[in-house]
Image (cartoon, rainbow, N blue to C red):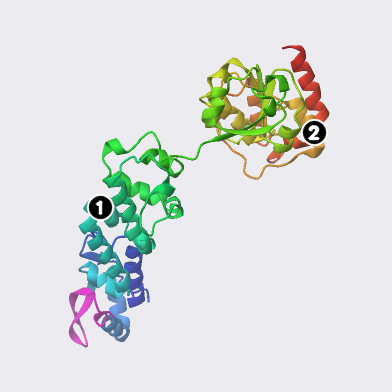
Amino acid sequence: MKWSTPPELRQQVQRWWDKGEILGNPAFPKRLTLKTPTATELRDHFEAVRMWSQQLRDMPHIRLEMREFRHLVFGQNALPDTAWIDDATSAIALIGKQKEARIFGQICMLTAARQPKLLTWLNKRPLRTLEIADSWEKLLAVVDWLLAHPRPAIHVRQMDISGVHSKFVEANRSVLGELLDLVLPAEAIDNAATGSSQFNRRYGFLDKPERIRLRWLDPACAPLAAFACSDLTVDAATFARLSPAVDRIFVTENEINFLAFPPLPNALVIFGAGYGFSALANADWLHDCKIHYWGDIDTHGFAILNELRSHFPHVQSLLMDRTTMFSGKALWTEELTPTQRELPRLAPEERELYDDLRDNRLGKNLRLEQEKIPFGDLLLVLQLIAVVR
C-alpha cells in the first residue's frame, strides 16, 4: 500500500528543517502531503485502512482533517484526509529538534539586545546560525568593536577584544562580512573591495604589504653596490619608488629560472606570483621598460600572461610559442585543472596555441613546464633580445 506513514510525514518535516523553513520567521500552518487510500482500497482492505488511520491519529504534533464516509458493513466512519503542522513548535517537537531550537532562540535574544539589525540575517540563515553558534558571541564582539571603531587603520592583530584573536577573524571573514554589511554605516565600507580576500580593505584594516622578489641582471644598475648580486624582496611601495636604471624587465614563474637567469645589460628579473600582479601596478616606471613574461606553456600560463597585460599591455611573451612547445614534445605532461576562460589580451599566435591547449586539439590537457625547456634555448633568445635592443 502506498499510503503516507508516520515516518514519511516526519521525513517531510525534516526536509522543511533542512531547507531552513522552520526556524526564523516560518510560514505556518504548513500542509503535509498525505497519500490516502482509494475507494477500492477502502472496500478491499478495510482492516488495513483502519490500522493506518489509527497510526496517524496517534501521531503527536499533527492536526488531521477527517473525511466522513459510509461502509456497507461497518457503517459511518472517518478517515484522515489532510494533515497539518500548525506551528514551528509542533514541527520542532515532531523531529526532535528542541535543543537546536532552544540554542537558536538564545542567539536571537542575545542579538536582539546587542545588534537587532542582525535578526534579519539570523532568520534568513537559521541553519548557518546553528553551525556557528559556539562562535556567535565572539562574532558579535567583533561587530560591536567595529561599530565603535569604524575603519580603524590598524592590523587585525591589533584589535583589543577579550577572547578574540586575529586567526578567529581570518577564519570567519566570510560570515563577518555579511554581518558587518548589515550593521556598519555606508561610509565605513569600501564597496570596491569584495570577497573574503579583500576583507581588510573593505572594513579599513591594514593589509600585509605585498612583496616583490627581484634580482639585478646588470650589477651596474643596482641602486647600491650591496644590492648588485642580491636576491632582494621589497614591498610594493618601495618597488614603485625604485625607478632603477634599467630598460628591460623579465618576469618568470619558476624560482630556479629566476635564480639562474643570466646577466643581461640594463635588466632585472622578477619572480612572478601567479595571478598576483597587483603589487606591480603602481610602479609607473615599468611602463617605460620592455617587459618579457616567461611562464609555463599551458592554459594557466597564458591566463597569467593575459592578467599581467591588464596592468602592462606591452608585455611580450618569452619561450611560450608553438615552436618551443613542439621542441619539448617528449617532456609534455598533463595540466591537472586547465582553465577555460576567454583571454582577450593574447596576441593572435598566442591565442591560437592557447585554444589548441584549452580545446585539447594537441592531446588531453597538455602542458610544457618552463623548467623543462633547455637552458640553452633561453640563452639563445636572450642573445637575440640583446642584439635588437
Classed neighbour count for the residue bearing mark 2: other residues with Cα under 10 Å, few (<14), some (14–19), many (≥20): some
Q: Nearer the viewer, residue 133 or 243?
A: 243
Task: Examine the rendering and report whether any part of residue 365 can be seen.
Answer: yes
Q: Is residue 171 left or right of residue 13?
A: right
Q: Secondary structure at mark 2?
A: loop
Q: Residue furthest front?
A: 225
Q: Position of residue 125 (x, y in %)?
A: 32, 56
Residue 226 — which label? none
Instruction: Identify which amino acid the numbered label 1 is placed on.
Output: Thr
What residue does disc 2 label?
Answer: 328
Q: Secondary structure at mark 1?
A: helix
Q: Nearer the viewer, residue 71 or 153?
A: 153
Instruction: Identify which amino acid the numbered label 2 is placed on.
Output: Gly
Q: Which residues are magenta?
A: 56-80
Residue at position x 29%, y 73% in the image: 98
The image quarter containing residue 20 is bottom left
Does the segment drawn in magenta span residue 78? yes
Q: Nearer the viewer, residue 98 or 354?
A: 98
Q: Position of residue 157 (x, y in %)?
A: 43, 49
Q: Position of residue 211 (x, y in %)?
A: 56, 35
Does the segment drawn in magenta span residue 61? yes
Task: Examine the rendering and report whether any part of residue 344 can be seen.
Answer: no
What kind of secondary structure does the magenta stretch mostly adopt? strand
Residue at position x 25%, y 79% in the image: 60
What residue does disc 1 label?
Answer: 120
- Which of discs 1 and 2 lies nearer the camera? The answer is 1
